[in-house]
Image (cartoon, helix red, strand yellow):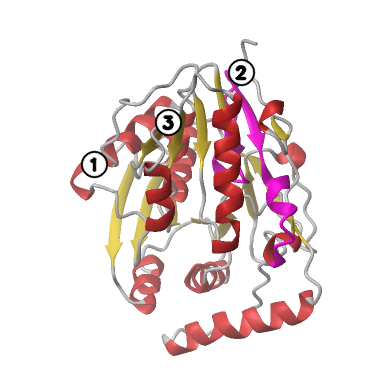
Amino acid sequence: MKVIKNVYVVLTEYQFLQAVNIATGVYNTESYINTIYIIRNGTRLQGLDTTKITVLNNITTHVIDNRTTKDIATIILREKPNHFLFFQAINAVNIYIAYKLSKKGVEISLGPDGYSAYAKFNKKYHFLSVIRDSIKENKILVENKLFVPFLRFDYYTYGCHKFINTLWITHPEQYVHSAKNKPNVIKLPEFNTDCISFIAHCFNYYDDFPIENVIYYFNQPLWENLYNTDFEFLEAVLNQFPQKKIAVKLHPLTTKTNKQKYQNNDRIILIESMVPAEVLLIKLKNCIVFSGWSTVLITENRHCNYYFNYPIFKKTNDFIINQLEIPALNHIKMITNPSEMKFPNE
C-alpha cells in the first residue's frame, strides 16, 4: 500500500489549528503520514509550549526556531512530500517551496489564512501594486540564494498561482474565485475533538473563562487612527448591556497601548491566552460574539449570535479600509450600533 506524505508549513496560531484540523479530519488513516512544520521567526506562536507537542495519531510536529529563509526551504524540500499544504500565499519562502515542489509533480494546496478568501480589494493601481510586491518578494529570495524564475505575487487576488491545485475554504458556497487559474475548492472539515484537545494542550489552555450568556469581543491589530473608534464602540456596548461584562480575547499582535486601555475598564475581562481563539469560540453558549472583521468569526457556532462592526471603521474614511470590502458570511450580521445586538435566547 502506498503511503502519501502530507507536509504542512504554518506561520501562525490559526494556521497550526487548521493544519491539525485537516490532518485529523481528512487524512487520519494509515494511508497518510502528516508532518507539520511550525516556523517561528518573530512574535507569532510564542505561546506554544514545545514540551507539550507529542505525536497525535499519524501526525508529527516540528518547530523550526529562528532559522534563515534558505534553511527553512532546505528542510522542507528534503521531506520529499506527495502533498504540500501552506497557508500564506504572500510569503516568499512558501511560494518558493510550493513552486519547486510543483515542478516535481507534488500536489499543492493553499489553506485559509485570514479573511482574504472572501475580501474584495479596490486597488486603484492593482497592476503597479503587483509589480512592486513581486519585486520585493523576489528580492527576498535572491538575497537568500533561492533562485527560481521571477515569481508573481498578487496580494489582492486569492489563490492565483498557477501551481496551486486545491484551495481549502471554510465556506466554499460564499467563495468567488476571481483568478484565471482553476484550482479545486474543498470545504474544510469542522473542528473535531482530537484537533481542539491537542491544540489546547499545546498552548496550555484550560477552560477558566465564562462561556455562557457573555459578550465576547475578538479584537485584531488596528492602526492608530482606528483606536478611538474601537474603544468608543466598546463603551457603547457596555452602555447597551449595563448588567454585562465584555470578555476580550486579545489577538497575539495587540499593542501594549491597546492592552492597557482594555485593562483600565473594570467591566472588561481580558483573555491573554495565545491559544487560537477558535478553541474558545466553539465552546460558547448563548453568547454575543463580535469583531471588526476578524478571521475568528469565520468559524460558526450556532449557539451564538455573530456581528461585524466593520461599517463603523468604514465610516472613518481610512485609506486602507477604503481599499477593502468585507462581505459578511451568512451567519454574520453587519452592524453600526450595539442596539442591533441581541442574545440568541432573546
The quadrant in which residue 286 appears is: top right
The question of residue 298 being in magenta is answered with yes
Report x, y in % for residue 149.
60, 85
Q: Quadrant of the C terminus?
A: top right
Residue 268 placement, left or right of 127:
left
Mark nearer the viewer, 2 or 1:
2
Identify residue type, mark 2: Phe
* Mark 2 surroundings within 10 Å by alpha-carbon count, few (fewer than 14), some (14 through 19), many (20 or more): some
Q: Nearer the viewer, residue 86 or 3?
A: 86
Identify residue type, mark 3: Arg
> Going 38% across and 78% down the picture, which residue do you hit?
70
Query: Nearer the N terminus, badge 2 or badge 3?
Result: 3
Residue located farthest toward the left when viewing the structure as drawn: 51
Identify residue type, mark 1: Thr
User: What is the number of callouts on the image?
Assistant: 3
User: Looking at the picture, does residue 227 appear above or below residue 311?
Assistant: below
Q: Nearer the viewer, residue 323 or 180?
A: 323
Query: Nearer the N terminus, badge 2 or badge 1?
Result: 1
Q: State the CA–CA distance, disc 1 to disc 3.
A: 38 Å
Label at residue 267: 3
User: Looking at the picture, does residue 262 appear above or below residue 342?
Assistant: below
The question of residue 42 being in magenta is answered with no
Residue located farthest toward the top when viewing the structure as drawn: 345
Mark 2, secondary structure of its residue: loop
> Going 70% across and 63% down the picture, which residue do you hit?
318
Report x, y in % for residue 89.
58, 64
What range of the chain is rendered magenta?
Answer: 290-319
Q: Which residue is mark 2?
A: 343
Q: Which residue is mark 1?
A: 54
Residue 47 placement, left or right of 33:
left
Q: Nearer the viewer, residue 292 or 123?
A: 292
